[in-house]
Image (spheres, rainbow, N blue to C red):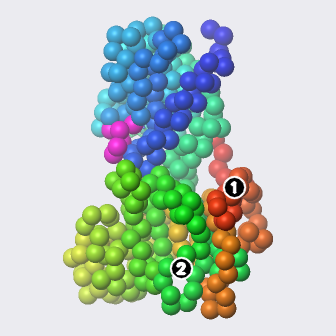
Amino acid sequence: MGGPTREDERFMAAALRLARRNLGLTSTNPSVACLVVKDGTIVGRAVTAPDGRPHAETQALADAGEQARGATAYVTLEPCSHHGRTPPCADALIASGVVRVVVCLLDPDERVAGRGVVMLRDAGIEVDIGVLRDEGERVLEAYLMRQRMKRPYVTLKLAVSADGMIGRKGEGQVRITGVVSRVQVQVLRAETDAILVGVGTASADDPELTVRLPGLEERSPVRIVLDRRLDLPMNSKLVRSARDVPLIVVAGEGDYAARRAALEAAGVEVLNADTVSDLLTALASRGISSLLVEGGARAARQFLDADLVDRILLYSGPSTLGEDGIRSPFDRTTVPAGFSLKRSARYGDDIFEDYERDTGCSQA
Ligand code: AOF
Ligand code: ZN
């Protein structure tokens, strides 16, 4: 009964790595991992299945079989106590014969909120909480944001040229960053529930906003276009692929019945929201926990002005675009106040910087 040990941290670190694997795949559920460990050896492991069910614990216990008896379970989120679409994982752990459960974070979901731990302890299982909590908060940051603030975690991604531009007027997609940065953005998309652009970018660039990395194609997020007057061209790649990868177009007030009907007939969902704040509330209520804002300048500004950006990923390329460029809301030297640099790297000729908002929400 000595409380958490170095070995506990080692297994929890492994569990958190496993949990990262299904980020962006399990919405509306968080991606949770469970390891079952007996005599220092992993005898069962699992991560929340795509689409959120089954949960991690039941799969890891099935993997461990009889070996679970007398073992320790490591879970990155408190086991659930509620009868949702699956029976409570706390019951499954109790029935399996594990003698100890090590938990990274308590589950803020009001159906759980500590009850999972109480069930385990009432059954005589030793429970330790908070092992590698900071790391867990990072892995689960999107889920925690939705639970605590009722909105998704918002990441703003910007690729800026050496002279502070994000594109050239009337020219569609312009290469600003190199191949490593572009691959990294694809991975980012795969880990995100939804991705957003303004209608200007959607019309000028005609992007598809899908994940095209081999093996990750199935992980394309929901695509969202801010399109107050429903101007998105019907022959855009976004609209044409709406039956394969969900597309939400966000309209303002106005009456655009004909355009709305045409979009809906093409498989597009039209959502009304007057402010980005309203939009985020609507997205959270349908289980979207993370949103990647990919451009352009106007969409970026809307989120910044509303103080609704949690993280900024800034890719600074080496070339200049010149006077007919579209100016970025900021560059490396003018990052908005309230954000701190957490990480930077060189990707070929690009400089990558990861900024986080200083006053994020902390664990309640
Ligand atoms: C776990 N293990 O692997 C996950 C959990 O809609 P349901 O019934 O699947 O329940 C969703 C809730 O379950 C979710 O809000 C969160 O509280 C918990 N997620 N719990 O024990 C898991 N993914
Ligand atoms: Zn569960």
Q: Give the amino acid type for the residue marked by disc 1 in the picture.
A: Ala
Q: Position of residue 270 (x, y in %)?
A: 33, 74
**278 or 56, nearer to the observer:** 56
Q: Is residue 60 or residue 216 the one in the foreground?
A: 216
Q: Is residue 362 magenta?
A: no
Give the quadrant of residue 103: top right
Amino acid type indicated by mark 2 = Val
Image mark for residue 291: none
Residue at 37% across, 17% down: 64
Residue beneath disc 2: 174
Give the percent coordinates (x, y) of residue 191.
47, 52
Of the image marks 1 and 2, the number of the one nearer the N terminus: 2
Residue stretch in magenta: 48-53
Q: Is residue 1 above or below residue 172?
A: above
Whether residue 33 is situated above or below residue 62 in the rendered picture: below
Mark 1 = which residue?
A: 345
